[in-house]
Image (cartoon, rainbow, N blue to C red):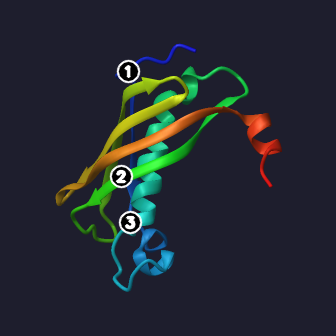
Amino acid sequence: MTLETGLRHSVVLHVTENDSAIYFKSGHVNVLATPRLIALCEEAACGAVDKELPPGKTSVGLRIQMDHVAPVRIGSDVTAEAILDKIEGRRLTFSVKAYGEPGTICAGFITRVIVDEESFISNIH
């Protein structure tokens, strides 16, 4: 593995009704849903390390710590960015943030763990 701190990745989402709190059943307002925002940040975290992991290895989510501080209208663009801050054995910690038209939308940390895909799948009950 060639993992090292500082690896980063960003992704952009054009928010549609399929990204809304109403669609995700996480609220009753037609704005970007928190679960969709978290998924976008996880996508950025995965993108930061996926190409650096050897064949057969992947990372899985362990912990999410996120403050969702601003609503986002349908039709807006949101950029999520993840930076690999810490490597502790198989445990990877990323700082994540998302921003767009209202400024900062969310900020926090995501922890993922490197696993062997085949072993991981075979141990699911």
Tag 1 secondary structure: loop
Q: Is residue 90 above or below residue 101?
A: above
Disc 3 versus disc 1: nearer the observer: 1
Q: Residues within 10 Å of mark 1 (few under 14, many from 20)?
A: few
* Mark 2 or mark 1, earlier in chain: 1
Task: Determine contact: label 3, label 1, CB under 8 Å.
Answer: no
Task: Determine contact: label 2, label 3, CB under 8 Å.
Answer: no
Q: Amino acid at mark 1?
A: Thr
Judged left or right of residue 109, residue 18 is right
Tell me the number on the disc at residue 110.
Answer: none
Place of residue 13 in the rendered image (x, y in percent of width and height, measured from the top left):
40, 54
Judged left or right of residue 47, residue 8 is left
- Residue occupying the point 33% across, 74% down: 31
Which residue is denoted by mark 2 in the rendering? 65
Disc 2 versus disc 3: nearer the observer: 2
Tell me the number on the disc at residue 34.
Answer: 3
Q: Is residue 42 above or below residue 16?
A: above
Depth check, front residue: 101 or 92 = 92
Examine the image and state in which quarter residue 35 appears.
bottom left
| Mark 2 and mark 1: Cα distance apart in space | 19 Å
Which residue is denoted by mark 1 in the rendering? 5
Q: Residue furthest left?
A: 103
Tag 3 secondary structure: helix
Examine the image and state in which quarter residue 36 appears.
bottom left
* Quadrant in which the N terminus is drawn: top right
Q: Residues within 10 Å of mark 2 (few under 14, many from 20)?
A: few
Place of residue 107 in the rendered image (x, y in percent of width and height, measured from the top left):
27, 50
Q: Amino acid at mark 3?
A: Thr
